[in-house]
Image (spheres, helix red, strand yellow):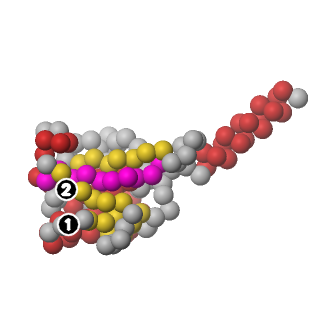
Amino acid sequence: MTIRWSWAYALLAYALLLGCGAPDGLVLRFSDATPEQHAAAEQAASEWRVACGSDIRIEPDGAVPIQIVPALSLGEHIAGHTARRSACAWCEMQTEAIYIDERFTTESAVYAHEMGHALGIVGHRSTGLMQPDGFIGLHVEVSDCP
């Protein structure tokens, strides 16, 4: 009987984990953006849609804000940050905000990198857009998809 209960708990845990990961869709918003900033973010969202089929949009009433922040608040060598929190006890994460360093607000790759985290990519990869450094100038490729 103990073995059956162990398997039952393992199957339950596995079933719960199947629901974890990338969100079904992501709707972002700018509180205040220049046309250049908005264009860079739109380009990044478009790249995720084309390469991965991700449902990512920028709308005035979007749930997740994109905030431009002073360089010193993120750190000297950090171009952006995605704040995520656990929405449930088992694993589902929700994106609270995307922060972009004011020095990189027209670099679509910075928006695309942070959107990747918001879409469920945890950590960084060794190559491509989701590497920790040197991704500026890169575009979303199929290999970047969550």
Does the residue at mark 1 contact the one at mark 2 (Cβ under 8 Å)? Answer: yes
Q: Please state the horizontal and vertical placement of residue 60, each as a whole percent of the image.
A: 31, 72
Regarding residue 71, the answer to whether it shows in the image is yes
Horizontal relation, residue 100 to residue 14: left or right: left
The amino acid type of the residue labelled 1 equals: Asp
Residue positioned most to the left: 103
Residue 94 covered by magenta stretch: yes
What SS does tag 1 mark? Answer: loop
* Prevailing secondary structure class for the magenta stretch in the rendered image: strand
Residue most toward the top?
A: 2
Classed neighbour count for the residue bearing mark 1: other residues with Cα under 10 Å, few (<14), some (14–19), many (≥20): few
Residue count near mark 2 (Cα–Cα under 10 Å), binned few <14, some 14–19, many ≥20: many
Residue 138 placed where, x, y %?
23, 56
Q: Answer whether residue 132 is magenta in the image.
A: no
First-in-chain label (1 vs 2): 1
Give the label on residue 8, or none.
none
* Element type where label 2 sits in the image: strand
Image coordinates for residue 64, horizontal then vertical, percent: 36, 60
Q: Is residue 48 left or right of residue 42?
A: right
The segment highlighted magenta reads 93-102
Q: Residue at x 39, y 63 (%)?
A: 63
The one nearer the camera, 123 or 141, is 123
Dot 1 corresponds to which residue?
Answer: 32
Task: Locate residue 18 relative to residue 134 in the image: left or right.
Answer: right
Above or below: residue 119 compared with residue 32? above
What residue is rendered at 77% in x and 31% in y?
6
- The residue beneath circle 2 is 68
Please provide percent x and percent y for residue 29.
31, 66
